[in-house]
Amino acid sequence: MITFKNVSKVYKPDITALHGVSFHIRPGEFVSVVGQSGSGKTTLAKLLFAEERATGGQILIGDWDITGIQRMQVPALRRQIGMVFQDYKLLPQRTVYENVAFALEVAGEKSARIRDIVPQVLRIVGLGSKMERFPRQLSGGEQQRVSIARALVHRPKIMLADEPTGNLDAITAQEILALLKKINEFGTTVVLVTHDKDIVNALHRRVITIHNGRIANDAEHGKYHLA
């Protein structure tokens, strides 16, 4: 599903964020990527989402080599990868329904399909009764659920969650984790980039540890351990 082959990333003038990183994530896996600040894990996420380009090596999503992806191809890639951020990135003047619908509108979906899909995904994330509320009327956990719903509307093969619990208390963080596990059970590959030790250790799933731009550890049933 996701393959990095000897991937490097150098930022100008001479800052190397990743050094020859290689790994393979199978379809349907739930993988946590951990590392200290500046370790390169966020760069890895940006490469996967085509926000940055690799300096060397090869990145595959299925059979698609995205290493040198063209700008016009990026929207198609991002429909396969649902992205969830720490800061939610919701539109404050739009309702919950409108925030989720917007992701479909910009992709050119027909109104009838939008009216069908949006309530479905909002029910999946437990917000079916709050479609007409605005972000300011929601808790942090509920706002993150809206963000997850928005990421689900294209039925992505991969869910990439970059510090999705960073702004949440421990109980709410566990609720978001449970939702990501539920999405994974549907067959979606989940890649979780996080600093949250408790979240990682509660998963008992694969953990890839990044240290100084290199893979320091890759454990099938790992725990949060920094080099």
Image (cartoon, grey):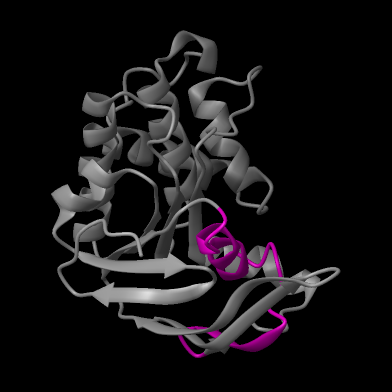
Pinpoint residue 90: horizontal percent, then vertical percent: 58, 29
Q: Position of residue 170 (x, y in %)?
A: 25, 27
Q: Quadrant of the N terminus?
A: bottom left
Q: What residue appears at the point 58 percent right and 47 percent down from the top-left corner? A: 104
View extreme (right): residue:
13
Q: Residue at x 44, y 62 (%)?
A: 156
Asked if residue 50 is among those painted magenta in the image, a careful observer would answer yes
Does the magenta-highlighted stretch encompass residue 82?
no
Q: Would you identify the image quadrant in which residue 49 lies? A: bottom right
Q: Position of residue 125 (x, y in %)?
A: 30, 36
**Depth check: 99 or 26 in front?**
26
Q: Quadrant of residue 148?
A: top left
The image quadrant where one finds the C terminus is bottom left
- As drawn, the residue found furthest toward the top would be 137
Q: Is residue 25 visible?
A: yes
Instruction: Please tell me which residue lies in front, 223 or 5.
Output: 223
Residue 115's place in the image compared with 76, above or below, is above
Q: Is residue 65 visible?
A: no
* Residue ID at (72%, 82%): 55
Q: Nearer the viewer, residue 1 or 22?
A: 22
- Tell which of 34 and 83 is nearer to you: 34
Query: How many numbered marks are there?
Result: 0
> Is residue 58 shown above or below 95?
below
Quadrant housing residue 103:
top right
| Residue 92 higher or lower than 170, as above or below | above
Residue at figure coordinates x 56%, y 69% from the top left: 48
Q: Is residue 174 left or right of residue 217?
A: left
Q: Position of residue 211 (x, y in %)?
A: 46, 67
**Is 148 on the left-hand or right-hand side of 174?**
right
Q: Which residues are magenta?
A: 38-63
